[in-house]
Image (cartoon, rainbow, N blue to C red):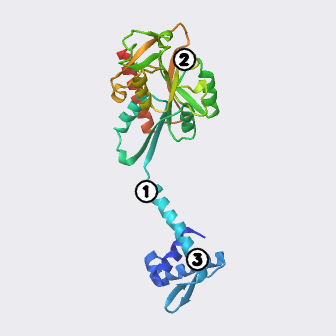
């Protein structure tokens, strides 16, 4: 049974005549008749009653044509989407820890394409989900950070998923808080000064390992800690509760707003360096959109480094 044979019998059932069907299908009537007989023999049923007035469906034929239409409609739908002149949109996705600069670079990338011709996706999500998204190719690129604390565990996980880490920038640790916070005007902030304020952290779900934390120094003993799922909630908690979080200090005011400050975190701990980078499949050849996204994120990070 072939798709061509299905098309033949569906057309015959619709026009009620082998001659008319042959004209519609641009095939000879003998060829069409032989194709139908071959199909009937392979199925072991009679699809049509033939008479001088034309053809009509048998009981078996009626049931078969109903199924054949479903199959052929699905085939046509696939061709409409994936065929040479199909309407399939090219896809590009990025998964990232909660970094506003990663979103900013994504915005600048999308501006360079006709969004009507592409299907774009940006996912600010949990650390493990970033890794899983890139591993499954749901996203082409993932943005995460490494530190001396989490590097061994994260790199082991990346290797197991056939992923590679590409360094973008090294940066220190900053306290990110609301400009109305009592410590916002400080030139630097020590851990002791933060004790009375809630530390804000992104929820990592059931895989809430210290190694997956988006905030460096996740093993510190914080008297108060509040989990959030998204960047907007995190910012609201900074204002409403004078909360703070520890971050890279690379903040996009265009997206986060100008009501927040990043103050250098002062510590005697030498393990406070963050290495931000992106992950891809091993031996991955970036798409045009992927290359542009990486260029945009590198350009933005370089501009921020110069400003500092």
Query: Where in the figure is residue 91, as x and y percent of width and height?
Result: 45, 44
Judging depth in this view, the residue of 195 and 94 nearest the camera is 195
SS state under label 1 = loop
In the rendered structure, which disc, 2 or 1, sits on the residue that comes first in sequence? 1
Find residue 148 and report its horizontal and vertical position in percent.
58, 17
Image vertical order of residue 180 relative to residue 232, above or below: above
Residue at the disc numbered 2: 223
Please name whichever residue, 32 or 91, is drawn nearer the observer in this view of the structure. 91
Q: Nearer the viewer, mark 3 or mark 1?
A: 3
**Which image quarter: residue 119?**
top left
Name which of mark 3 and mark 1 comes first in the sequence: 3
Quick one: which residue is furthest to the bottom in this view? Answer: 52
Category of crowding for the residue at label 3, using alpha-carbon neighbours closer than 10 angstroms: few (below 14), some (14–19), many (at least 20):
few
User: How far apart are the alpha carbons under marks 2 and 1?
Assistant: 58 Å
Q: Residue at x 57, y 87 (%)?
A: 49
Vertical side of 102 occupied by 175: above or below: above
**Residue for badge 1:** 86
Q: CA distance from mark 3 to mark 1?
A: 31 Å
Report the Cα–Cα distance between label 3 and label 2.
71 Å
Disc 2 versus disc 1: nearer the observer: 2
Q: Name the residue carrying label 3.
A: 63
Q: Residue at x 61, y 76 (%)?
A: 39
> Can residue 308 be seen by looking at this rendering?
yes
Q: Pinpoint residue 2: horizontal percent, then vertical percent.
A: 58, 69
Tell me what residue is drawn at x 52 percent, y 71 percent: 69
Graded by Cα atoms within 10 Å as few (under 14), some (14 to 19) or many (20 or more), the crowding at tag 2 reads few
Residue 281 in view in this figure: no
The reply to whether the C-beta atoms of the residues labelled 3 and 2 are less than 8 Å apart is: no
């Amino acid at each position: 049974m072939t798709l061509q044979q299905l098309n033949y019998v569906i057309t015959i059932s619709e026009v009620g005549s082998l001659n008319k069907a042959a004209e519609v299908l641009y095939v000879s009537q003998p060829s069409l008749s032989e194709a139908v007989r071959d199909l009937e023999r392979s199925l072991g049923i009679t699809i049509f009653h033939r008479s001088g007035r034309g053809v009509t469906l048998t009981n078996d034929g009626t049931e078969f044509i109903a199924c054949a239409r479903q199959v052929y409609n699905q085939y046509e739908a696939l061709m409409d989407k994936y065929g040479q002149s199909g309407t399939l949109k090219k896809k590009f996705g990025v998964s990232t820890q909660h970094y506003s600069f990663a979103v900013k670079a994504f915005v600048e990338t999308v501006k360079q394409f006709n969004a009507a011709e592409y299907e774009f996706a940006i996912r600010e999500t949990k650390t493990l989900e970033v890794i899983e998204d890139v591993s499954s190719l749901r996203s082409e690129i993932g943005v995460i950070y490494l530190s001396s604390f989490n590097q061994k565990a994260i790199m082991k996980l990346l290797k197991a998923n056939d992923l590679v880490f590409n360094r973008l920038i090294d940066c220190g640790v900053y306290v990110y808080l609301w400009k109305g916070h009592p410590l916002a005007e400080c030139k630097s902030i020590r851990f002791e000064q933060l004790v009375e304020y809630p530390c804000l952290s992104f929820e990592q779900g059931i895989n809430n390992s210290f190694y997956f934390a988006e905030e460096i120094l996740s093993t510190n003993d914080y008297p108060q800690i509040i989990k959030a799922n998204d960047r907007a909630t995190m910012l609201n908690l900074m204002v409403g509760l004078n909360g703070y979080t520890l971050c890279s200090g690379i903040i996009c005011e265009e997206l986060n707003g100008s009501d927040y400050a990043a103050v250098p975190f002062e510590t005697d701990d030498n393990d406070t360096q963050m290495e931000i980078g992106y992950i891809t499949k091993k031996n991955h050849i970036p798409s045009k959109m992927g290359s542009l996204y990486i260029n945009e994120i590198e350009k933005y990070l370089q501009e921020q480094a110069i400003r500092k």
